């Protein structure tokens, strides 16, 4: 038997060889019943199978993982059969029992997830339009099936060498499940369907599960930028995760990992098309079709039978064309080839019934003896006959109302260029015409096509008429453009590019220091930088006990209080913990914040011994009853008269944003604005302020959902250095420093206590703990996950004694992760 690459490879690759593991719903196999064959079926590779085509450009060896063909789905699980298929075809089967497969595929995939991705909301408990409401039992079946796929992949996987390519929405949960089994697995996921707008995606009850699943891959691929944009917007709106672009590549920082977002349309299998086009029977059939429709313009549509291919709209447009253009009656024919439906259900039956009824109505109205304007072919056609129709057709028409890519125009272009009778004269320029829906993924790449809104039947009819009137030169130019694109963006190029990008995305996997966090579909791995580690009691408690002069520096928002709260005042728990820390005479405790001094003073009134450094250190007081000290800088705040109107303009233009006026600074907040619009406005505001304040002694900085203007020479780092210097002048130089913060401005504090010049002014044996909140790139050596972990750590210090051993505090951290 031939190998997937066509190179004669017939044995399972050795475990030592790096492999590409291609995971799809179905294996690229044909299964023909044969009572005399082992297991009752003859298996062969299916050259038309998309998984086989998509692997053309991957380095060998390639192993396929998927369910058996539907004709052989009843075969019971058999490791003997699995070993045989792996050895002969590099195919490793996943045995899904009938009930599970039905709930997984027909239930959740085809009647819930697939319609949702194609913009169909289930507005009633059981929508007659094809979508069903979310069913938790079906979702559990979906996860169970994905788990069985993960088990099979894991059996084959060498995580340090192999690359795993997961295809399409059927296996959307697989990256999370596989990442849980193998944290260092090298995983790529490509979505072949649309990714809907975030407004619709948010209607899915398990939306966070699905987003986190894609983020557990190392690379996520989409056909078009629109789909990628919708995915990025959903990540921002639902998970608060932003993205970045570097040298043309889009990335998402997800718990220390960089998830690459790839945009690349799948092309056609040129080798396979050329092979079938060269068959004598293809040429014979093409000649037969050309002869049959000689003297008439032949429209061709090739579609799966489903709700979204717009077949009925296409036929209605043909009817409208014949109504408006009476001279075309008898001169144009639409041949509609209906591929077999991929699932069963009332929605499919409705589509088929409506198409046939529309055909009969149009043929009754406009048919003539020996002429039917609509020809619907429902019987499955062999590949050579289908390509013969592509070759003979004058115009290709695609009116899908929503489709992930749709390669029909690509196949048509190749057939018109390389088909046996693509032109009437040998050597004459090839020509074609394409009418394509603007809602299909291939539309942006077809610059010479007539793009239409398929819902506008008059517009489609007009486009069909324009295609008929198109000159030979116009058809030739369009054909040249499309053919040039198709041959340079085929499946080989697609697979090679995807493989190279996944290798780059995973180049640091072997050296990653990782921590597994979360349960079930919330599972993720946290990647720690070199020397970057979670701050555990085992690190800090011993140092805290053996030191005698301690300085504890705490940011406020996002550190001891979570972000996003409406009421920002400290809780009773925060006040109690701070008072317990301050009650130890060895401790000097400061809240270092960008907030206004009066606000902080009011909130922390119950904390008698707490120090406060407000407005990034411009105002400082050492205890509740001590006076406020201000920076020694002589400042002129006239720049506010310039900056505030600019901020007000952006606040008025950005719903949900507002301005905070401080004594020394101005802050534009946009945490309540639309995430995408707010972020875009923040970048523009920052640039605008830097322009108008270029000659002023201020700095314009961005933080967590803020843009802030501060005087130069004022900052948390400078404030911390001043605090340490003051303690030294009082002969209380700290030999223990704990500094915790979460924002960009807190990095200045970390630098102030860890820079060599700063450390040299501290006692030689000083214990320094710089800790950021959230695992992200930082100057800090330690991290904690969130403010609740910060409070648990501080509570542990406040109450630590010989009665509170390190082990019990360590357990607190383990429990917090769960």
Image (cartoon, rainbow, N blue to C red):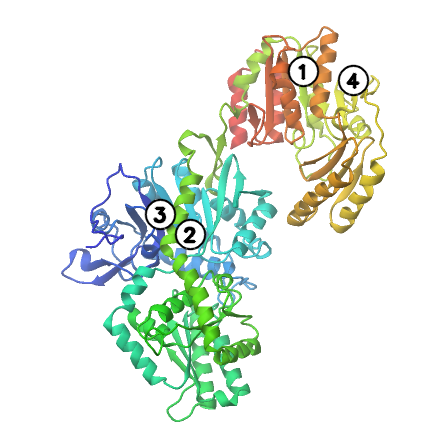
Q: Residue at x 30, y 51 (%)?
A: 95
Instruction: Check residue 149 in the rendering and tell me which mark sits there, or answer none.
Output: 3
Could you classify mark 3 by the number of other residues whose Cα lies within 10 Å: few (under 14), some (14-19), or many (20 or more)? Answer: many
Q: Is residue 34 shown left or right of residue 775?
A: left
Using the numbered discs, state the Cα–Cα distance from disc 1 to disc 4 in whole angstroms. 14 Å
The disc, 1 or 4, on the residue closer to the chain's N-terminal end is 1
Residue 744, x across and y down, in percent: 65, 31
Say if residue 311 shows up in the picture.
no
Please tell me which residue lies in front, 289 or 353. 289
Q: Residue at x 76, y 51 (%)?
A: 653
Which residue bears the numbered disc 4? 623
Could you classify mark 1 by the number of other residues whose Cα lies within 10 Å: few (under 14), some (14-19), or many (20 or more)? Answer: many
Say if residue 444 shows up in the picture.
yes
Residue 522, x across and y down, in percent: 50, 41
Using the numbered discs, state the Cα–Cα distance from disc 1 to disc 2 in whole angstroms. 53 Å
Marks 1,4: beta carbons within 8 A: no
Please tell me which residue lies in front, 202 or 2. 2
Mark in the foreground, 1 or 4? 1
Which residue bears the numbered disc 2? 142
The disc, 4 or 3, on the residue closer to the chain's N-terminal end is 3
Determine the secondary structure under disc 1.
Answer: strand
Residue 775 versus residue 727 in the image, above or below: below
Mark in the foreground, 1 or 2? 1
Which residue bears the numbered disc 1? 551
Please tell me which residue lies in front, 8 or 588. 8
């Amino acid at each position: 038997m031939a190998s997937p690459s066509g190179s004669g490879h017939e044995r399972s690759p050795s475990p030592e060889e790096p492999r590409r593991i291609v995971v799809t719903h179905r294996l690229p196999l044909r299964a023909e019943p044969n009572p005399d064959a082992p297991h009752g079926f003859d298996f062969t590779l299916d050259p038309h199978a998309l998984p086989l085509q998509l692997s053309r450009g991957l380095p060998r060896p390639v192993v396929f993982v998927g369910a058996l063909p539907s004709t052989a789905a009843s075969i019971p699980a058999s490791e003997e059969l699995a070993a045989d298929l792996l050895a002969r075809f590099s195919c490793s089967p996943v045995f899904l029992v009938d009930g599970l497969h039905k709930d997984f595929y027909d239930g959740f995939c085809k009647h819930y997830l697939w319609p949702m991705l194609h913009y169909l909301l289930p507005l009633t408990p059981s929508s007659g339009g094809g979508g069903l409401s979310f069913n938790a039992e079906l979702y559990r079946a979906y996860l169970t099936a994905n788990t069985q796929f993960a088990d099979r992949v894991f059996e084959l996987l060498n995580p340090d060498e192999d690359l795993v390519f997961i295809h399409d929405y059927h296996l959307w949960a697989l990256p999370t499940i596989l990442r849980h089994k193998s944290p260092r697995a090298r995983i790529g996921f490509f979505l072949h369907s649309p990714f809907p707008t975030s407004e619709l995606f948010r209607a899915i009850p398990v939306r966070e599960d699905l987003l986190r699943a894609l983020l557990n891959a190392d690379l996520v691929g989409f056909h078009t930028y629109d789909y990628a944009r919708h995915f990025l917007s959903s990540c921002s709106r639902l998970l608060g995760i932003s993205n970045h672009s570097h040298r043309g590549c889009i990335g998402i920082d997800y718990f220390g990992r960089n998830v690459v977002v790839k945009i690349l349309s799948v092309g056609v299998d040129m080798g396979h098309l050329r092979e079938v086009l060269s068959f004598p029977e293809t040429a014979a059939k093409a000649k037969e079709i050309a002869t049959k429709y000689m003297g008439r313009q032949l429209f061709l549509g090739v579609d799966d039978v489903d709700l979204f291919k717009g077949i009925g709209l296409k036929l209605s447009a043909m009817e409208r064309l014949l109504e408006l253009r009476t001279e075309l009656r008898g001169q144009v024919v639409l041949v509609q080839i209906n591929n077999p439906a991929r699932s069963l259900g009332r929605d499919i039956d409705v589509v088929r019934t409506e198409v046939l009824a529309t055909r009969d109505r149009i043929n009754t109205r406009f048919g003539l003896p020996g002429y039917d304007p609509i020809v619907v072919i429902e019987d499955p056609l062999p590949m050579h006959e289908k390509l013969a129709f592509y070759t003979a057709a004058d115009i290709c028409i695609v009116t899908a109302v929503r489709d992930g890519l749709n390669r029909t125009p690509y196949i048509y272009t190749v057939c018109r260029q390389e088909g046996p009778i693509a032109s009437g004269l040998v050597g004459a320029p090839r020509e074609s015409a394409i009418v394509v829906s603007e809602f299909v993924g291939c539309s942006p790449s077809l610059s010479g096509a007539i793009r239409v809104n398929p819902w506008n039947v008059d517009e489609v009819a007009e486009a069909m008429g324009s295609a008929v009137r198109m000159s030979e030169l116009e058809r030739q130019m369009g054909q040249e453009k499309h053919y040039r694109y198709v041959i340079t963006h085929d499946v080989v190029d697609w697979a090679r590019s995807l493989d190279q990008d996944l290798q780059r995305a995973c180049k640091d996997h072997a050296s990653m220091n990782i921590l597994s966090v979360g349960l079930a579909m919330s599972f993720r791995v946290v990647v720690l930088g070199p020397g970057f580690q979670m701050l555990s009691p085992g690190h800090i408690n011993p140092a805290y006990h053996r030191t005698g002069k301690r300085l504890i520096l705490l940011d406020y928002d996002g550190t001891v209080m979570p972000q996003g709260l409406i009421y920002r005042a400290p809780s009773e728990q925060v006040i109690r913990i701070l008072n317990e820390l301050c009650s130890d005479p060895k401790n000097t405790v400061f809240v270092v914040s960008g907030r206004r001094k009066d606000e902080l003073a009011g909130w922390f009134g119950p904390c008698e011994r707490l120090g406060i450094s407000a407005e990034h250190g411009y105002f400082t007081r050492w205890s509740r009853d001590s006076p406020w000290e201000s920076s020694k800088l002589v400042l002129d705040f006239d720049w506010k008269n310039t900056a505030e109107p600019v901020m007000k303009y952006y606040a008025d233009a950005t719903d949900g944003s507002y301005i905070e006026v401080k004594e020394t600074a101005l802050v534009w907040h946009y945490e309540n604005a639309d995430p995408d619009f707010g972020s875009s406005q923040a970048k523009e505001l920052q640039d605008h302020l830097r322009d108008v304040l270029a000659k002023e002694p201020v700095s314009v900085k961005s933080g967590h959902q803020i843009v802030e203007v501060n005087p130069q020479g004022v900052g948390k780092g400078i404030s911390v250095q001043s605090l340490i210097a003051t303690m030294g002048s009082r002969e209380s130089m700290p030999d223990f420093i704990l500094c915790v913060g979460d924002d960009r401005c807190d990095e200045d504090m970390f630098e102030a206590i860890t820079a060599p010049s700063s450390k040299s002014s501290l006692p030689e044996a000083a214990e320094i703990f710089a800790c950021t909140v959230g695992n992200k790139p930082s100057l800090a050596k330690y991290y904690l996950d969130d403010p609740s972990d910060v409070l648990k750590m501080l509570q542990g210090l406040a109450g630590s004694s010989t009665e509170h051993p390190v082990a019990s505090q360590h357990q607190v951290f383990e429990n917090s992760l769960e």
